[in-house]
Image (tube, rainbow, N blue to C red):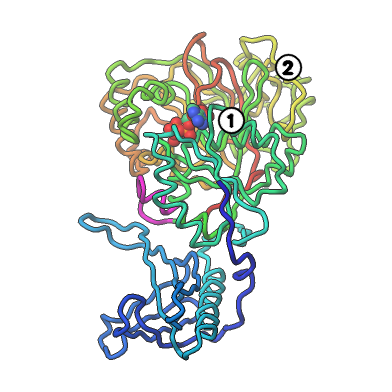
């Protein structure tokens, strides 16, 4: 389904009304009610005429406005025209605490003269001015480098919808909220409903990307995982991965969508409120950078992650809770309680390149890395066997404790995508300046790229989409069930790092390697199960672009 926008260039240019506009208009539904309306650089102020009470004055911040349009009704006897502005301000929830974005439509009737053309022109002048001012007022966060998508643009959005995601409500969400928002914001789009797993991946691998201004998914994180990997499988991957990506939550985890909302600094929201928040960000069209991690699997396959890698408790909950999909986001809490009852220890080895040792720009060359035995590669390593970090219980790598793979055949095939200059081959020891975790008994290992593991779990509160960091957590064996439960309950508010759990370790890293000891188990990447076995990954800072705010 294609949706074109009738006024393709109307809002591209601010209309020059820098000093604002003032007018008096009637209510769109009640001709007896009149308003004075004034537009200034950052706000639209509406006051009922004949009322001097401040309670009848409403001020809308233009950062909350996604669009404005003018129109005339099909009635020759009526010379009036209308303009309607669409706002999504944060408002207190009805019958509940906290705030969420809520839709507010402000519509005015323009009938200044007995000439329908002149009235429509005036309505259009207002609509243009409100659109222009709201574009100039985009909310921006400090420290984030933004570029902008200008809606409407010549190329359209490919909106990929997985009708099976979450509780199967994605299309309902589209028709219930998103279709209207895109129309209000003049965003042209083509709706593509996926038919099977890997449909989206194949589509973006083959697509003529010059036709598309952005690839937006209305689904869970799994569909974006397909899109990211499809883009990086292309011959022109370097350009392809620059295609702006967007996410609208319709899955059960919705971790990236929840992270995007977290980055805006507003109180957490869930379900359709999160959908509205992300829909709003999409309509505003600000672009930030997005980090990806390339992950090498034992078979030699390489995949790209934008979200998380989990092994142990979290991965098992993710996979096992599939059977509770009908309860939606609650599925992870149910899965956590079930897995707690049969808590397991997972054996394996973990090593990582901490940020303090990560080469800034002069990355290790892969061939250099793999041709030198661990422990001999640089002077950095000279005293490293002794330099154990007692708090974290890690040691610098040496040839004695080097992590090696259980699999001999790990030669990557001819690969597209960025090269992994921080990683040796998977069958080679990790470099000497990496840290190796002492002990092999874990409850979980979790590598996070974004703040949220799900809508309900704020696993890496400090993370941002483009911080160039992998936020690595591990929980060592020995933790009691109540302590582990406390950890997850604290994680709901992102407070798990302040409860002083001695079994929890948090490291900011640029690369890591994980070698499970068992031959069977579960590893998930962005919530999707991947082949089990040794793997390693490294950060690629800001190589993709994300529609965020
Ligand atoms: N039409 C389809 N039918 C079946 N599976 C699909 C279809 N389209 C995509 N998929 C696959 O379904 C899986 C789950 O999708 P997705 O992650 O979007 O939803 P979810 O698992 O409900 O959400 P979350 O990841 O937030 O928990 C993914 O592996 C995706 O590739």
Which image quadrant is residue 110 in? bottom left
Instruction: Tell me, yes or no, whether the highlighted magenta stretch contains residue 276.
Output: yes
Q: Relative to 174, does residue 500 appear above or below in the rendering?
A: above
Residue 11 seen in render: yes
Q: In this figure, which residue is indicated by the disc labeled 1? A: 199
Are there few (<14), some (14-19), or many (20+) residues within 10 Å of tag 1? some
Q: In this figure, which residue is indicated by the disc labeled 2? A: 411
How many numbered circles does the render carry? Answer: 2
Are there few (<14), some (14-19), or many (20+) residues within 10 Å of tag 2? some
State the image coordinates of residue 368 (x, y, percent, origin top left): 79, 26
Residue 144 seen in render: no
Disc sitting over residue 101 in the figure: none
Residue shown at 45% from the left, 28% from the top? 474
Nearest-to-viewer mark from 1 and 2 = 1
Q: Relative to 150, does residue 442 appear above or below in the rendering?
A: above
Q: Which residues are magenta?
A: 265-278
Residue shown at 53% from the left, 18% from the top? 349
Considering the numbered disc 1 on the image, is that residue within a helix, a strand or a loop? helix
Asked if the residue at label 2 sits under 8 Å from ligand 1, the reply is no
């Amino acid at each position: 389904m294609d949706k074109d926008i009738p006024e393709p260039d109307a809002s591209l240019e601010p209309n020059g009304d820098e000093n604002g506009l003032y007018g008096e208009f009637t209510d769109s539904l009640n001709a007896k009610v009149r308003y004075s309306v004034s537009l200034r650089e950052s706000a639209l102020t509406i006051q009922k005429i004949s009322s001097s009470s401040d309670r009848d004055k409403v001020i809308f911040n233009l950062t909350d406005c996604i669009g404005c349009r003018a129109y005339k009704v099909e009635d020759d006897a009526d010379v009036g025209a209308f303009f309607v502005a669409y706002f999504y301000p944060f408002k207190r929830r009805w019958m509940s605490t906290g705030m969420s974005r809520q839709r507010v439509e402000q519509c005015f009737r323009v009938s200044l003269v007995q000439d329908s053309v002149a009235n429509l022109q005036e309505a259009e002048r207002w609509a243009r001015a409100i659109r222009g001012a709201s574009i100039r007022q985009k909310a921006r966060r400090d420290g984030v480098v933004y570029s902008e998508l200008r809606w409407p643009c010549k190329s359209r959005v490919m909106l990929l919808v997985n009708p099976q995601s979450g509780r199967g409500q994605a299309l309902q969400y589209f028709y219930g909220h998103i279709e209207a928002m895109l129309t209000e914001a003049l965003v042209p789009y083509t709706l593509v409903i996926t038919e099977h797993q890997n449909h989206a991946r194949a589509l973006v691998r083959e697509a003529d990307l010059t036709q598309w201004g952005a690839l937006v998914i209305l689904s869970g994180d799994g569909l974006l995982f397909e899109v990211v990997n499809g883009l990086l499988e292309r011959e022109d991957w370097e350009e392809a991965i620059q295609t702006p990506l967007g996410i609208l939550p319709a899955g059960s985890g919705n971790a990236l969508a929840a992270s995007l909302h977290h980055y805006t600094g507003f109180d957490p929201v869930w379900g359709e409120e999160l959908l509205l928040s992300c829909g709003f960000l999409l309509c505003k069209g600000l672009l930030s950078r997005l980090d990806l991690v390339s992950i090498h699997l034992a078979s030699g396959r390489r995949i790209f992650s934008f979200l998380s890698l989990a092994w142990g408790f979290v991965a098992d909950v993710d996979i096992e809770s599939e059977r509770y999909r009908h309860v939606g986001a609650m599925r992870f809490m149910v899965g956590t309680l079930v897995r707690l009852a049969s808590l397991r220890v997972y054996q394996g080895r973990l090593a990582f390149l901490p940020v303090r040792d990560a080469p800034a720009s002069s990355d290790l060359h892969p061939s250099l890395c793999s041709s030198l035995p661990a422990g001999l590669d640089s002077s950095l390593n000279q005293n490293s066997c002794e330099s154990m970090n007692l708090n974290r219980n890690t040691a610098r790598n040496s040839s004695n404790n080097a992590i090696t793979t259980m699999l001999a055949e790990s030669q990557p095939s001819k690969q597209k995508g960025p090269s992994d200059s921080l990683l040796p081959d998977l069958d080679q020891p990790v470099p000497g300046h990496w840290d190796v975790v002492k002990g092999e008994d874990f409850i979980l290992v979790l590598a996070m790229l974004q703040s949220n593991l799900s809508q309900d779990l704020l696993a890496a509160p400090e993370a941002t989409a483009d911080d160039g960091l992998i936020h690595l957590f591990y929980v060592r064996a020995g933790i009691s069930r109540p302590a582990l439960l406390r950890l997850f309950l604290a994680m709901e508010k992102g407070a798990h790092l302040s409860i002083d759990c001695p079994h929890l370790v948090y490291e900011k890293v640029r690369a890591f390697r994980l070698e499970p000891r068992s031959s069977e188990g579960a590893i998930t990447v962005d919530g999707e199960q991947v082949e089990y076995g040794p793997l390693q990954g490294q950060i690629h800072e800001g190589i993709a672009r994300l529609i965020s705010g």
